[in-house]
Image (tube, rainbow, N blue to C red):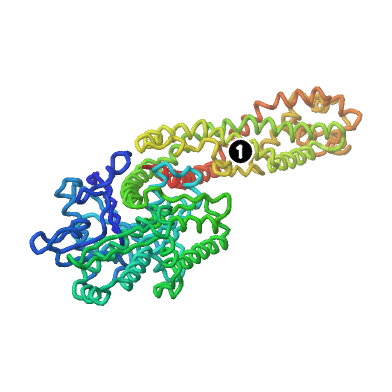
Amino acid sequence: MSILETIGFDLGHGETAVAKAIVESIEPPQMLEINNKKNQITALGWHPKLGYLVGEQALIQAGVTQLKIAFKQKPNNDPNYKETISTFLATYYRQLKESRQIEGGENSYFYVGCPSGWSTLEREEYQKLLQEAGIPKLNVVPESRAAFLQAKEAGKLEYNQLKSEVLIIDIGSSTTDFTLVKSLHEIPIDFGSNALGASLIDKAIFARTLAEHEQSSLLKKVFQEYPHHQARCELACRKAKEDYFSNEQLYSDSQSFARGFESINEQIYFIPQVNKLIMEEILNQQLPELRLHSWIKSFREAIIEAKQKLDKQSIVPKLLLMTGGASRMNFTRFICEEIFSEPETQIRPDPEPERCIALGLARVGRWDLRATAFKEEVNKLFDEKFLKELISQHIPELIESLTQPLAENLIENAVKPGLEQWQKNKIRTLADLEVAMKGQAEQWFRSDRSQEIINQKCISWFNNKIQPELGAKTDPICRKYQIPRSSLRFEDTIDPAFVNPELRIGDAILGDTVAFIINVLIGGATLASITTLILTGHFIWPIVLVYGASVMAAGMELNRKTVKEAIKTNVDVPSWMRSSFLSDQKIEDVCEQIKPEVEKVLREQLTANQEAFDQLIAKVGLGLQQALSTKVQEAIILIQ
């Protein structure tokens, strides 16, 4: 694999963070640094001598003449937007390579996040735009997926939560995104116009501070002529907001303030400040970006709408995962706990929301590559031809395992009851007995007990013959990708219908088998006395019954075969004679005597029933491929 590392690039509206994961390792990703910091303000500055600068350096470097912040947005045709995004990413890429924190080129695969609410088309356009930065391998994936995978691999999700529904609420600077995730599949939940980003709070603080500033008019002129000064002041407002929500208790007093600071020049300062009273006013003031609703009201309505949409689908998420830097605002968690009050739903804010997405993106990239390689290995190994040959090879053992229990139950449920009925004169002739036995045999083969026996034997055959050979192939793959070997095994989980042959034991098999039993009864030791008496002339009346007195008078010679057929079809032995010819003990003896032969006949008939087992081979082969595919999809959740 030429790709050695995956780079998680969290280009946020407010902050940017980068992480790296080694593809052939399961060690946690490592945060990378720009300007000796793991998180940077999303800022791009231009310096006449130093060129483009990013993050803190763009903010503090003297002589920066152009400064842009908070520029992440949906793809559009604005050339300035395109240039800013592309240049920002290219500058980051260059600095990461120069500091030798990444390999770069074909060895590094960048995974960049985007809001889950973006459409597929918007995601594709964003990816095309980012590729203009000159990064050879780059993919755009939903940030919600990164948050989910980070929670999973950091050990914050149990296996049942991985397979069940998890609701992710990503409260970012520009948007709040709701995503339902199940088994790594993301389903964005839309709610009206998604402009609910925490940067609106920054702007509200900025507007309030500017309005109350002693030199408000002068500042407006400065901001208009020098936009980078306004950008710096907005960042000061953001710092004041973050300081407040990090230490809310400190600022509950009316005389305590969380402050930001920006110097316009030696005489003019911009100092935003907030405390509990001011923040409550800001959170509850009407904002034009939110259709004149307040931030806190809009957030509550969005949570309620998401809850209602899940309720309509009868979905109760096992986990509500909160991420995004703004999830540090405690009131957002309180609202989520109030609305998602079901005891089954666990509310869990990410402890490091500012790093969560970058780490998760690096994990997503590594997981994608390893999962793809894992699926390719399994699919290549278990192609249709291999599976059919494996199953076909063990069909004789399946037939052998079915023969004995089927024969025993056929005798017990059809032969023995039929003989007992003939003994008690409930069946007239041996031909009638043959019909009755066949009917009882057919009825038994259609019974639940018959199906249960076939199920048990087929499952045992699969587990003892097919499963070990499959396991010998899958276990090394599981070890390679460091997942439990049970992930690709079917022990205790195989569906009986999956491995059952459609034997259709009916006329073909039962006719031959039952006919054999009747022949044993007529020609064998049990009822041979009837035949012998007739053939030796000591027992004349049955022949008269069969052929009539005129035939006997003509002295017609009867051969043994003819007599047997005649006895079978027409002789009705008197009831008082039947128990002497076929006692209870003789019935037991007959059943024991014919057991090996019945097994032989069934074995031959099952073996000859090639069509049924050809269908079984095809069915199990196809079923195994589908079941393995399902197993693979479940197993890849465990890949790191």
Foreground of the two, 412 or 44? 44
Q: Position of residue 621 (x, y in %)?
A: 47, 44
Quarter of the picture holding the C terminus: top left
Instruction: Tell me if residue 237 comes above or below residue 451 in the rendering.
Output: below
Residue that label 1 marks: 455
The residue lying furthest to the front in this view is 255
Question: How busy is the neighbourhood of tag 1: few (under 14 within 10 Å), some, or many (20 plus)?
Answer: many
Question: Helix or strand or loop: what does disc 1 sit on?
Answer: helix
The residue lying furthest to the left in this view is 49
Quarter of the picture holding the N terminus: top left
Q: Is residue 226 left or right of residue 488?
A: left
Q: Position of residue 50 (x, y in %)?
A: 10, 59
Q: Is residue 372 visible?
A: no
Which residue is rendered at x = 50% and y = 52% of the image?
165
Foreground of the two, 334 or 177? 334
Q: Is residue 218 left or right of residue 635?
A: left
Which residue is rendered at x = 31% and y = 46% of the image?
366
Amino acid type indicated by mark 1: Asn
Instruction: Tell me if residue 232 comes above or below residue 157 in the rendering.
Output: below
Quarter-of-image position of residue 408: top right
Q: Position of residue 238 (x, y in %)?
A: 32, 61
Q: Is residue 4 left or right of residue 501?
A: left
Q: Position of residue 363 (x, y in %)?
A: 33, 47
Instruction: Tell me if residue 78 comes above or below residue 25 in the rendering.
Output: below
The residue lying furthest to the right in this view is 576
